[in-house]
Image (cartoon, rainbow, N blue to C red):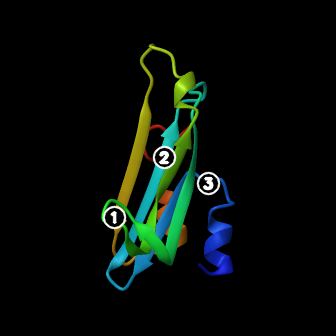
Amino acid sequence: MTKEKELFNQTGGQQFAIQNSYGLILIQLVVEKDFPIIANSFLLDDRTQADPPENIPGQFGNIGFLSSNWEKVDTAPHHLLFNVLLLQKASLEQGFKALEHFPGRK
């Protein structure tokens, strides 16, 4: 992976965007304030690493969220909210501004 891609995994963010000539997709994970899990955005783009379950080399642009601390979740109801926004003819700035108005944002 490039240095820029490796830096992506160090941001600790809970939102990301993917943009190409067709448009823009923004994905945001909203976790309750007192929910004990830790979730951060994650990117793996390594042609040499095996892709399970077939173990064929080639992790191409796997992106999402990695989470941990699930063993600390109690039996009370909790909420995780994924906001996904698909836009055409919008800039990254416009897209992230729109995410500010999605449900679950505080």
Between label 2 and label 1, give the one nearer the viewer: 2
For the N terminus, the image quarter is bottom right
- Locate residue 48 relative to residue 13 in the image: left or right: left
Q: Amino acid at mark 1?
A: Leu
Which residue in the structure is indicated by mark 1? Answer: 86
Pointer 3 local density, CA inside 10 Å: few below 14, some 14–19, many at least 20: some
Q: Amino acid at mark 3?
A: Gly
Task: Tell me what residue is drawn at x 52 percent, y 30 percent.
Answer: 70
Label ID, residue 14 = none
For the C terminus, the image quarter is top right
Q: Earlier in the sequence, mark 2 or mark 3?
A: 3
Task: Tell me what residue is drawn at x 43 percent, y 62 percent.
Answer: 26
Please indicate, yes or no, whether residue 99 appears anywhere in the rendered image.
Answer: no
Using the rendered view, name the quadrant where residue 20 is placed: bottom left
Task: Tell me what residue is drawn at x 50 percent, y 41 percent.
Answer: 30
Please indicate, yes or no, whether residue 38 appears anywhere in the rendered image.
Answer: yes
| Mark 1: secondary structure | strand
Q: Are marks 2 and 1 in contact (CB under 8 Å)?
A: no
